[in-house]
Amino acid sequence: MDKVRLEEGLNQLPLYAYEYISPESLDFTQRVRQVCRQECPMYGKTWACPPGVGTVEECRQRCLSYGACLIVGTITQVQDISNLEECLATRGDHEAITNQVGDLLREQGAEPYILSSQACALCRHCTYPEGKPCRHPEKMHPCIESHGINLIPTLEAMGLEFTYSQDVITWYSLLFYNP
C-alpha cells in the first residue's frame, strides 16, 4: 500500500481528522449494544444494526481480522443542535466522504470493511426482518455502535472531540483493511 498516495487523497477530502489505529485498540463492550437495544428505534430493523450484524463477539472478531483501521471524521455546522431532523440531514455528506475514503483504499488494493454513523438508510424498507439478504451489501455500512464499539475512549486518546461544539455535528467512520 502506498501510504503517501493514500494520504494525498485523504488530504483532498474535507475531513476534520483522520488517524490510523490498531483494531485491537478499540473498546468493544456489551454496554453499547444494550444502549442500542433500549434506545435505538432501528434495533432489529436493518442488516446494519443489531441483532442483524451478529453478536458483539462476532463483530469484534470480524473487525480484529483486519490488520489496520483508519478512523475518519467530518464536522458540519447546524443552526439548531436540538433539531434532530436538521442534524441527521448532514449525515449524507459524511457518508459520501466515507465512500470516497473507501474508494481510496480500494485504489490501493485494500478491501475495506466500513462502519459508519447511524443506521443504514439506503432502502426505504430493509429486507432484514423478512430474513432476505441485504439488497446492497457492497454499499451498506453498519453503525459503529452496532458492533459494540465505544468510540469515545479512542477519540479521547487521539485528542479528538465527540461533541465538537454547540452548533457543530461530528460524524466518524471506521474503515478496517489489510494493508
Image (cartoon, grey):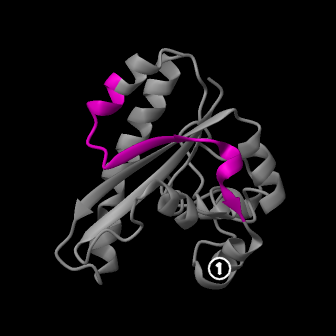
Q: Nearer the viewer, residue 98 or 120?
A: 98
* Image quadrant in which you'd find residue 160: bottom left
Q: Please determine whether, in this image, residue 106 is positioned above or below residue 149.
A: above
- The percent position of residue 101, horizontal first and vertical second, equals 42, 34
Residue depicted at x 35% and y 67%: 88
Please identify the quadrant where the C terminus is shown.
top right
Q: Looking at the figure, which quarter contains the N terminus? A: top right
Secondary structure at badge 1 equals: helix
One can see residue 124 in this view = no
Q: Residue at coordinates 42% horizontally, 23% vertically from top-left?
A: 6
| 143 horizontally vs 130: left or right | left
Residue at image position (59%, 23%) is: 110
Mark 1 burial class by Cα count in 10 Å: few <14, some 14-19, many 20+: some
Left or right: where 161 falls relative to 121: left
Residue 135 screen position, x and y as percent: 61, 44
Q: Quadrant of residue 137?
A: top right
12 and 161: which one is in front? 161
- Residue located beneath label 1 in the image: 35
Left or right: 129 with respect to 9? right
Residue type at mark 1 is: Val
Answer whether residue 54 is magenta in the image.
no
Q: Please give the count of numbered marks on the rendered protein.
A: 1
Residue 96 can be seen in this image:
yes
Q: Nearer the viewer, residue 14 or 42?
A: 14
Q: Residue furthest left?
A: 79
Residue 116 point in image, percent of width and height: 51, 53
Quadrant assignment, res 171: bottom left
Residue segment shown in magenta: 8-28
Can you say whether 104 is above or below 172 in the image? Answer: above
Position above or below: 21 against 27: above
